[in-house]
């Protein structure tokens, strides 16, 4: 309820605020007490323990690292699924209740919908995916007291790992019978936020695409021309993978439909359209896509608002590519009809 009790900004200036996206998140080895995310797509796992209990001290570090190793196997889709389910639950803070993860992050960070081109859902998902693949996340053990053996362990791990592991102690003072004061103390280094990556350009993207198989590269080029002819191709950010997003604008509303990466992966942005397009329209779009051989978009893309992916290889056959483009155009027409 009070993520501000985690005072990351006191250690490194510019660290983004945290959004709670799960409580008692079930995984095979147990349940994560709290799960947070920030606008950089960096996850924070929080475990609470009594530091004075020697057995708890010995097990909590191994436990939280085990949780982290499992979470690193997630995809951005899985993060969205967990977050969206929590934000729809009774436990979600009223301020963010029934918002999608992306909408909640926008609200937390004070980013207006008009600035979506600068902070797009696709780039946010890309950041989540990149952090998971590289094992970057923040682990936080909340304890009643910062005991020295635990400090020494945390110091060692921070020097020899790709993640931040921190200790948080919260002292509870009763100012009066009706008011308590909570004073947090944080121990452990926090790496500064990653500087924003450069936006890709069409020439740079096409040069990267040439590394793909010839049929895949030609299909990517055709999809780029399709996007430019039927809407807007917005260039994304990335270190090694370029991307563009096919976007349509209707009554000043920005609706992104798919994101194409330079290595031949296509993200279908149900997670963006989820709260902006009727479920019936999205279900029809899903059905049309599933009519293409080797494509199977799960139902939770519509019900949970995820970002399923397909391979450009599935569209190399001209008839399959035609079906994909027709499905996208049909979706655009239905969206326009809904907004009239």
Image (spheres, rainbow, N blue to C red):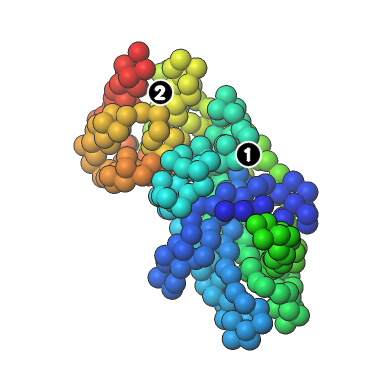
Q: Quadrant of the C terminus?
A: top left
Name the residue located 75 percent from the left edge and 51 percent from the top edge: 9
Looking at the rendering, which quadrant does residue 156 occupy? bottom right
Name the residue located 60 percent from the left edge and 74 percent from the top edge: 49
Between marks 2 and 1 in the image, the one whose residue lies nearer the viewer: 1
Q: Is residue 205 left or right of residue 174?
A: left
The answer to which of 33 and 127 lies nearer the viewer is: 33
The answer to which of 336 and 133 lies nearer the viewer is: 336
Residue extending farthest to the top is 340
- Residue on which disc 2 sits: 226
Mark 2 and mark 1: span between their CA atoms? 34 Å
- Residue on which disc 1 sits: 109
Q: Position of residue 50 (x, y in %)?
A: 62, 77
The answer to which of 194 and 215 lies nearer the viewer is: 194
Q: Is residue 291 above or below residue 114?
A: below
Name the residue located 48 percent from the left edge and 31 percent from the top edge: 245
Looking at the rendering, which quadrant does residue 174 occupy? bottom right
Name the residue located 66 percent from the left edge and 40 percent from the top edge: 197
Q: Is residue 260 left or right of residue 337?
A: right
């Amino acid at each position: 309820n009070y993520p501000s009790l985690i005072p990351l900004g006191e250690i490194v200036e510019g660290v983004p605020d945290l959004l709670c996206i799960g409580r008692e998140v079930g995984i095979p080895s147990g349940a994560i007490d709290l799960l947070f995310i920030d606008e950089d797509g960096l996850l924070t796992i929080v475990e609470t323990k009594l530091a004075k209990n020697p057995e708890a001290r010995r097990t909590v570090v191994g436990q939280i690292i085990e949780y982290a190793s499992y979470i690193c196997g997630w995809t951005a889709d899985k993060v969205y699924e967990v977050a969206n389910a929590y934000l729809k639950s009774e436990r979600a803070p009223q301020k963010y209740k029934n918002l999608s993860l992306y909408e909640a992050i926008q609200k937390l960070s004070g980013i207006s919908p008009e600035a979506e081109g600068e902070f797009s859902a696709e780039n946010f998902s890309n950041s989540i995916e990149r952090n998971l693949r590289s094992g970057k996340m923040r682990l936080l053990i909340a304890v009643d007291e910062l005991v020295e053996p635990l400090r020494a362990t945390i110091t060692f791990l921070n020097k020899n790992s790709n993640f931040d592991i921190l200790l948080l102690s919260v002292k509870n003072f009763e100012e009066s019978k009706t008011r308590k004061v909570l004073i947090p103390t944080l121990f452990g280094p926090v790496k500064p936020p990653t500087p924003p990556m450069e936006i890709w350009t069409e020439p740079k993207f096409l040069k990267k695409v040439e590394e793909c198989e010839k049929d895949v590269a030609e299909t990517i080029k055709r999809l780029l021309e399709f996007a430019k002819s039927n809407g807007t191709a917005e260039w994304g950010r990335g270190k090694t993978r370029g991307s563009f997003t096919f976007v349509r604008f209707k009554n000043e509303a920005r609706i992104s439909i798919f994101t194409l990466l330079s290595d031949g992966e296509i993200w279908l942005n149900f997670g963006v359209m989820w709260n902006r397009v009727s479920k019936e329209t999205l279900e029809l779009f899903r059905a049309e896509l599933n009519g293409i051989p080797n494509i199977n978009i799960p139902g939770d893309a519509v019900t949970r608002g995820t970002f399923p992916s397909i391979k450009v290889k599935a569209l190399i056959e001209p008839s399959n590519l035609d079906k994909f483009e027709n499905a996208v155009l049909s979706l655009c027409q239905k969206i326009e009809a809904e907004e009239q």
